[in-house]
Each structure stands twice: as C-alpha cells, then as structure tokens.
Amino acid sequence: FEKSNRQRAEAYQRVGVDREVRAQEQEESIKYMKDIRDYGKEYSAKQIAKTAMYAYDMEKSKKLNKPLWVAPENWTPELYGSHPQEYKELILASRQQMADELEKRFKMKADEAKKVATEHIKGTFDVGHANFWWKYYQSQSADGDPVKARKEFESWIHKETEKLTKEGIIGHVHLSDNFGYHDEHLAPGQGNFPTSEFVKRIKAAGFKGK
C-alpha cells in the first residue's frame, strides 16, 4: 500500500513538472507570436522596399532622368492590402523601410531619404478591383433599397480615393470596369463603376499621374 502511494505521488509530481514545462514553453512561444495583419504588412513592406531599392539602383546605373518607381496595386477584398486603409498603410510602411535602407546604405539624411522613397514607391489604384468591395458592402441606412445602397458605396469609394490622392499614395490608375463581382476588364462605362466622377474627383484632389 505504501509503495503504491509513493508511486502515485511520483506520477503526480512528474505530471506537475510536465505541465509546468509546457506552460513555460507556451509563454516563451507567445513572445514570438504576431498578428497576421501586422506580419503581412511587415513582410510585404520589406519586399516592396527591396524592389524599390533595386529600381533606384537601376535608375542610377542607367542615369535615367526620372525616378524609376514601383507601384503596388490594390487587388481583391479577400487579400490583405486591398482595403483603402490597408493599401495606404502598406505603401507608407514600404516607404519607411526604403527610407531606412537609404539612410543605412547611402548615409542620406532622413528628410532626403523620405523624399526619395516617396518618389520610388507609389500605388497603382485599379478602379475595377476597388469595385469588388461592392459584393461585401453592407449599407447602414439604405433600408434594403439597392439604388440607395449603391450610391452610398460609390460615395465611400470617392471619399477614400480622394484621401489617398491628397496624401500622395496613388501614383498611377488602372481604368477598367465590371459590375462589382468579377474582374471582367470591361471598357470604362460598360460596367457600373462611376469612372467619370472618379477621374474628376481625383484630379480635383491633385492627381498628376497617368
């Protein structure tokens, strides 16, 4: 009986130690965990900045008269970086990564590095891809009226793109049309994206690109 109790006690002790070790391992692993959105932005920004640095080196070696820049593009809502705010955050993070590298490699001052990075990383905004958000749009005040909901959606797109333009995020625009569900690549006006209004608004907001 005494031997049995001793064996049981030793077994409980081993279990307790094992649980303590596993708890310590979990605590250690938590230190290295990162939100998938943060990881996605950090990883993507590094790759974009790396490409922009290559473009910068190529520009200098070939003695080009204008900046050779890279243009990350918004894509489908299901992927990180396509929402206007994510798109903005990603491009700003990429510029910061490039600016840090310019300061490190070429001993540039911070202001100059920031200016060079801004010139070499500009977003391509595809209106057809932006129109994909329509299939997920949930109106808060249209009361089931699809026409009113569509107007609200278009108003949201205009506000977001005007902000992106004013903040210097968009450097290039792709004009293609669809009905908000598939990348049909219709000519402007053949789908339901308000292309004319979009162009008018971004020009008023200061867009100078193509």
Image (cartoon, rainbow, N blue to C red):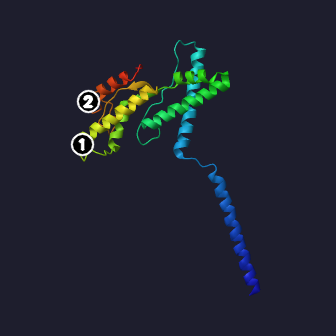
Quadrant where the C terminus is found in the figure = top left
Q: Amino acid at mark 1?
A: Pro
Q: Is residue 27 above or below residue 87?
A: below
Tell me: 52 left or right of 19: left
Q: Is residue 187 visible?
A: no
Tell me the residue at 41%/30% (across/down).
163
Q: Is residue 63 visible?
A: yes
Tell me: 198 left or right of 4: left
Q: Secondary structure at mark 1?
A: helix
| Picture quadrant of residue 135 | top left
Tell me the residue at 55%/21% (across/down).
115
Callout 1 crowding tier (Cα within 10 Å): few <14, some 14–19, many ≥20: few
Q: Nearer the viewer, residue 207 or 21?
A: 207
The tag on residue 185 is none
**The furthest residue to the bottom:** 1
**Which residue lies under the disc numbered 2?**
190
Mark 1 and mark 2: Cα distance apart in space: 19 Å
Callout 2 crowding tier (Cα within 10 Å): few <14, some 14–19, many ≥20: few
**Which residue lies under the disc numbered 1?**
146
Tag 1 near tag 2, CB within 8 Å:
no
Q: Earlier in the sequence, mark 1 or mark 2?
A: 1
Viewer-nearest of discs 1 and 2: 1
Q: Position of residue 199 (x, y in %)?
A: 33, 24
Quadrant where the N terminus is found in the figure = bottom right
| Picture quadrant of residue 76 | top left
Q: Is residue 54 above or below residue 146?
A: above
Q: Amino acid at mark 2?
A: Gln
| Number of numbered markers | 2
Q: Position of residue 52 (x, y in %)?
A: 56, 25
Q: Secondary structure at mark 2?
A: loop
Q: Position of residue 120 (x, y in %)?
A: 53, 23
Q: Position of residue 105 (x, y in %)?
A: 67, 24
